[in-house]
Image (spheres, coloured by chain):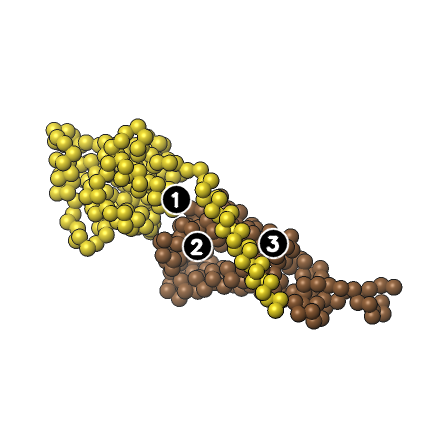
Amino acid sequence: MKWKRVFAEALALVVLAGALALAAGLLEPGAKNPAGLGSSSSDARNLAPSAGSLKAASGQDERKKLLLSLAPSKDPSLLYLEIQGDVAFRLHQAGALFIDARRRESYLESHISYALNIPVWGSKAEEGIRALQSGGVSFDDVIVVYCSGADCSDSLALSEKLAMSGYLNLYIYEMGFPEWEANGWPITSGESP
Amino acid sequence: MGSEWLAYNLRGKPVNPFIHNRYLCIAIRTLLGAIFLYASWSKIFDPSAFAQALWNYKLFPMAVISPLSYFVPWLEAVIGLALISGIGRKGAALLASALLVTFMLAISIDLARGISISCGCFSSAAAPQSHEQGIWLMKVDLLRDLGFLVLAAHVLRAPVTWRPSSNSNL
């Protein structure tokens, strides 16, 4: 049957495409670490701000306790909880870790102050999550993930990845960067947090 | 004495010389190859955007999206080159058909579920402005892919050889 030749050709093309895709994935240039993680500071949490009333608070444990008290209570069986702008702002002021799930180009253009960037698509997500772990972010730290608003599912996807990696206190800022910017809350641009 | 080309399929039997006109066959597979090559181009250089398009289908599990976002564009490119060059064109046509059927199925499922998505077929451009516009574009994508499937089927059924007829009276 000559159809054997057709299937053999198809198989050969699939193998060739697979090899090219593997090579492209290995050769893809990309940030080894998301902005600020594991480079100038070994502790990612140092990148989060200390609000005025918290400057007197001492130690990472105190800050963690404060954040956990400010964060809405979350059913442990849920991977994450969606929060509104006012809660997100309170957590930001208290020094919670914010993660921008959008693509790097969007992050560099403008992002919430002190937010880290872990683009959810491509190989960078896994690299970013590993950098979080090596950067000293504990599994029970409060983490707020955001993207471009209610229609954007990137924060959802990244939160699932973070949850699968062991992070317990995940919150998704539902309205995301557009609402934050519209409210005139702290934003910045470029590489600097 | 002139000669007439006779077309023979995979089993060595003669086929319709009009539908399987040699130059028409070459034109169709070159066109289909160019379409696949064009479709792959932007996705090869931006796999993360294509990954997002795949995610938006809400059909694929998270674990397969990243590998697919690399593999599918390169598969399209290899299919395109095979069709244009003619080397392995039958296998390429078979793969093209399979890819097209898969995407048509995915679009159909999302249409049935009322989910408006961007196909991600030729680019990972921004989503349409309204839900109705998105649904309409999905139907257009479906019809377009059906057209491509017809072309792929033609390449698959096209003769593998053309031989001059020794009995021609021309």
Q: Mark 1 touching mark 3, by CB under 8 A?
A: no
**Image quarter for residue A135?**
top left
* Residue B7 in the image, given as x and y percentages of width and height: 72, 66
Residue A123 got which mark? 1
Q: How many residues crowd mark 1 within 10 Å: few (<14), some (14–19), many (20+)?
A: some
* Residue B82 in the image, given as x and y percentages of width and height: 60, 54
Subunit under mark 3:
B
Q: Mark 2 touching mark 3, by CB under 8 A?
A: no
Q: Secondary structure at mark 2?
A: loop
In the displayed structure, B34 sits above or below A1; it is: above
Q: Colour of chain A?
A: yellow
Residue type at the position of mark 1: Ser
Q: Secondary structure at mark 3?
A: helix
Q: How many marks?
A: 3
Judged by depth in the image, the label closer to the viewer, 2 or 3, is 3
Q: Are marks 1 and 3 on the same chain?
A: no
Q: Secondary structure at mark 1?
A: loop
- Which residue in the protein does label 3 denote? B82
